[in-house]
Image: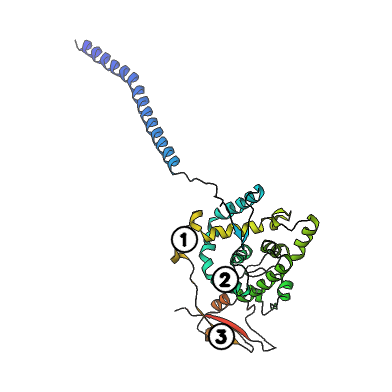
Amino acid sequence: MLLVNYFSEKGSKMKKKKWWKYVLPIIIAAKIVVVVMILESARADNTQANIESKTEFKAVGIPDSITFAGEKMPLGEFDVREALDRELLSNAYFHSQTIRFIKLAPRYFSIVEPILKEKGIPDDFKYLAVAESSLNPRAVSPAKAVGFWQFMKGTAQDYGLEVTLEIDERYHVEKATYAACDYLLNSYKKYGNWTLVAASYNRGITGIQQQITRQKTDDYYSLLLNPETQRYVYRIAALKLILQNPEKYNFVVTEDEKYPIIPTKNVEISGKVGNFADFAIEHGISYKTLKDFNPWLRENYLTNAKSKKYIVKIPEVK
């Protein structure tokens, strides 16, 4: 009897083992299916979220008409329209640089605008300065053009700017602006056309005249020029459009985010200065601040053998 019970129990255990042998893989497979379904669902949700939140890059709207310095740009011509489109795209999607332009514009336009008006230069030429130096008074090009208006040394001296080891007035925003105005007026006397005047600022009066003579046209938009000058007026026009109406091109910069105009006082120097670090301390500022507001001072001293009068700007920051 005991033997019968033993075999009976053993048979029952064997049946149970056989049952689990078949059921266990099914359970494992079911769990794997559930996990896969959960992962696929999560992936689908993420994909949908990505689709819904994706960034769209859109073409920039081109205005129906635009003028530069009062002269109409012929947007009805396909090549003119596409050239402007190129510069609008380049600047509207160069976000960091263009936002900086928007922030800097009030500070430097407040200096440039009155001088342009005084000299009879169209206000749109302030955007030429943006194209030239990115509103950086310390800008230096690979060709060694210097300052806010990017003067070469010889041209700067021709237009009355002092360029020495100690003084370089190409870095002086006001004086360089007056010199730039004189250049522009000289060019206008030759061409009688502000668009060509702007082009000549980039290529030179002689360079533009050579192409006018060669190609038998004095229309900037019909001239074949070197790539930089070919794009130059369009870039100025694009900067004008964006800086005049940044919201239209999706730039949102509040007034309090723009860089403030720092009030300054004028200090006259008519003799030598042994050390500008001492000079700065005497006027309650650092050497760095002195040079930031007067980058045209190129050394830490001034010999001033001819006893010229120089005006140094000292910021009045509380």
Q: Residue furthest left?
A: 1
Disc 1 marks which residue? 253
* Residue 154 occupies quadrant: bottom right
Q: Give the residue type at disc 3.
A: Val
Q: Looking at the image, do the residues carrying marks 2 and 1 touch, with CB atoms under 8 Å apart?
A: no
Q: Residue furthest right?
A: 214
Disc 2 marks which residue? 113
Question: Residue at point 46% right, 61% down?
Answer: 253
Residue 267: numbered disc: 3
Category of crowding for the residue at label 2, using alpha-carbon neighbours closer than 10 angstroms: few (below 14), some (14–19), many (at least 20): some
Residue 308: numbered disc: none
Residue 209, image x, y percentages: 77, 62
Q: Give the residue type at disc 2.
A: Glu
Seen in the picture, residue 218 relative to 12 is either above or below; the reply is below
Instruction: Say which of marks 2 and 3 sits in front.
Output: 2
Instruction: Say which of marks 2 and 1 sits in front.
Output: 2
- Whole-Å distance between the Cαs marked 2 and 3? 23 Å
Q: Give the residue type at disc 1.
A: Val
